[in-house]
Structure formats: structure tokens, C-alpha cells
Amino acid sequence: MTSFPTLDPELAAAVTMLPNLDFSDLPSARATFDSLVGSLLADLSFDGVRVQELSVPGLGDDPDVGVRFFTPENTGGPLPVLLWIHGGGFAIGTAASSDPFCVEVVRELGCAVASVEYRLAPETPFPGPLDDCYAALTHLHAHADEWGIDPSRIAVGGQSAGGGLAAGTVLRARDEGVVPVAFQLLDIPELDDRLTTASMTTFIDTPLWHRPNAILSWQYYLGASYTGSEDPNVSIYAAPARATDLRGLPPTYLCTMELDPLRDEGIDYALGLLRAGISVELHSFPGTFHGSGLLATAEVSKRAMAEALDALRRGLRVVSPAS
């Protein structure tokens, strides 16, 4: 692996313990990721948080979509809610892999979180995963009373590929005009299948995520008809970086990591939003890499988490932190 002189010392001390996720062997990558997440979830406490395994109808003839629904115990509604979409390069991971983040949001903000169990590529290429996320969003909004949530305070967020799915879901919500999304939170989002940015062409062997995996990720997600970066038929809902009109989108928090192939497409998307008149908070965290937040005890990871929570608090107009 290339050495990275600017890598945060706390992260550098742990990086050799991280597994290699090789998307050319997807079964192995899935098993490796599940094992990593399993170790992180083993000691997770849900004290003070109620978790329900629910489902919503899929779009059209699609199957029902699973939702892990987190709420504070002993609270009254209606609650603001974050629709959350997990990462995994469109091809690995589960909703449960985001449980630590969802629990933290509920405890710190006192709001609800609906974590979507969308179908994975390549078994289900675009638009299937996006449809699942959009089905969850529209159902939450239409049935807000049943879920005990405030339909005027719905945020959509996600991490990595989940950040790309979140951006695509929000673009679709804007265009269809059914759900007024109040805020979007895009954490190290995967947005651009064209893979031409400086960070994407430079970082070919960075920890956890790198250009070779990114190439395969988009091939899995966009399916057999995808012809590559010059393909003119890629939907903006699949690759939001291709959108040329970002007007009318909600206020946004977007964060990137310095040593991440996805860094520049995230920054470019944030700048595009700003130029379109959208209120944006953009953070690029020094010395970090894609997924370095898994090393949660590092000071830079703590800072990233605190800033995301604070942005979400303001975006959902949460009056005071939960006690």
C-alpha cells in the first residue's frame, strides 16, 4: 500500500488492522464486511432506544422494503425523522450495519431514524435500490401519523453509496413534488460514475475504498447495459453528479475525507449546490480516509460525528438535545 504522509496518526496506528475489501470477489467482500460490522455491533447498547423491524410496500410490483425504525423510549410524537441509507458500494452491507450511527442520532437528538434495507446490486441493479429508498420516503410521508413522525421535518441522509442513494432520492423527491424533504445529509457520498476527478484517479490503493473497487461498484449498480463513463443514458437519480440543475434542493450537509477517492466528487457536488442557491455546509476532514469513522475513538472521527449531529439538529429544527 502507498504511504500517506498526511494520514492522521491515530488512524495510521489502526489502519493495518482493517480488512481488505476486494469487490472483484463479491462473496468474500460481503463476508469480510459482515464480519467487521458484526464485531462492531457485538457490544452496542440500545438502552433508551426502541428498535422495530418494519416494512413498507415496494413501488409497483417490487417486494416490500424493510425498515429498521429507531425511536426514543418513552417519548411523544410527532418526531422529526431521518431516513437513513447505509453504505457498501451499492453491493454489500445491511441496514443493521448503521445501527451505531442510528442509535447515536436518536439519543443525541431525540428524533426518529428509519434505516432502509434496500436491495443490493448486482442482483438488483438501478433503479431497484433507489426505488426501495424512494418507496420508504413516500410511505413515511404519507403515513406520518401512523409512524408518529412530523411530515414537515423529514431529512434524508446516507453514507458512501448510501449518500449517493440519498442524493438521488432527494433529486427524485424534488422532481415528483410529493415529499418536501427538509434537509439532506451526505456523508462521503458516492455520486459520479465517470470517475475522472483528481482524487479518484490518484487514490488507487487507499484503505477500505479505492479506484478499482469504485469501477466495479458502478458496473454492478448500473447493470449489464452500462457502457462506461461516456454512457449518455445514466440517470441523474443513479449518479447525481450528472445532474445539471440542482435548484430547489433542500439545505445540505456534506462531508468528505482527505484520502478518499470520492473526495473531489463530493466537493464538486457541494459547490454545484451552492452555485444553485442551496444552503450548504461542507467539511473535509484532514488526515482521514473513506470509512475511517469506523475507528470511532479517534479524535477526528469524534469531531466528524459531532459536526454531523449538530448539522442534523439544525436541519430538523430540533429545539434542544435529548437528555
Image (cartoon, rainbow, N blue to C red):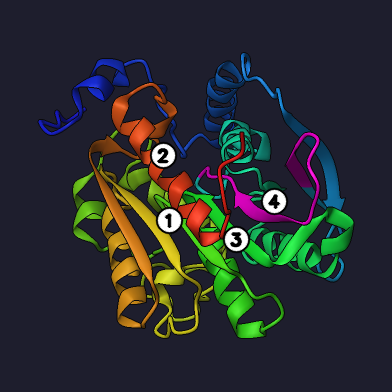
Cα distance in 3D space between marks 4 and 3: 17 Å
From which residue to which does the magenta span run? 67-88
State if disc 2 and disc 1 touch (CB < 8 Å). no
Q: Residue 311 or 30: which is nearer the viewer?
A: 311
Query: With respect to residue 211, does 29 lie above or below?
Result: above
Q: Which residue is mark 1?
A: 190
Q: Which residue is mark 4?
A: 118
Of mark 1 and mark 2, the one earlier in the sequence is: 1
Dividing the picture into quadrants, the one containing residue 195 is bottom left
Q: Is residue 318 visible?
A: yes
Dividing the picture into quadrants, the one containing residue 171 is bottom right
Of mark 4 and mark 1, the one earlier in the sequence is: 4
Residue 39: percent from the left, percent from the top?
Answer: 57, 16
- Measuring 65% from the left and 67% from the top, which residue is drawn there? 127
Assess disc 2: are there few (<14), some (14-19) or many (≥20) residues with their C-alpha within 10 Å of its C-alpha: few
Tag 2 secondary structure: helix
Query: With respect to residue 280, does 200 lie above or below?
Result: above
- Measuring 36% from the left and 75% from the top, which residue is drawn there? 273
Tag 3 secondary structure: strand
Q: Which residue is mark 3?
A: 155
Q: Residue 105 or 78: which is nearer the viewer?
A: 78
What's the residue type where badge 1 is placed? Glu
Cα distance in 3D space between marks 1 and 3: 18 Å
Residue 52: percent from the left, percent from the top?
Answer: 82, 38
- Measuring 54% from the left and 28% from the top, which residue is drawn there? 33
In the rendered view of the protein, which quadrant contains the N terminus?
Answer: top left
State if disc 2 and disc 3 touch (CB < 8 Å). no
In the rendered view of the protein, which quadrant contains the C terminus?
Answer: top right
Of mark 4 and mark 3, the one earlier in the sequence is: 4
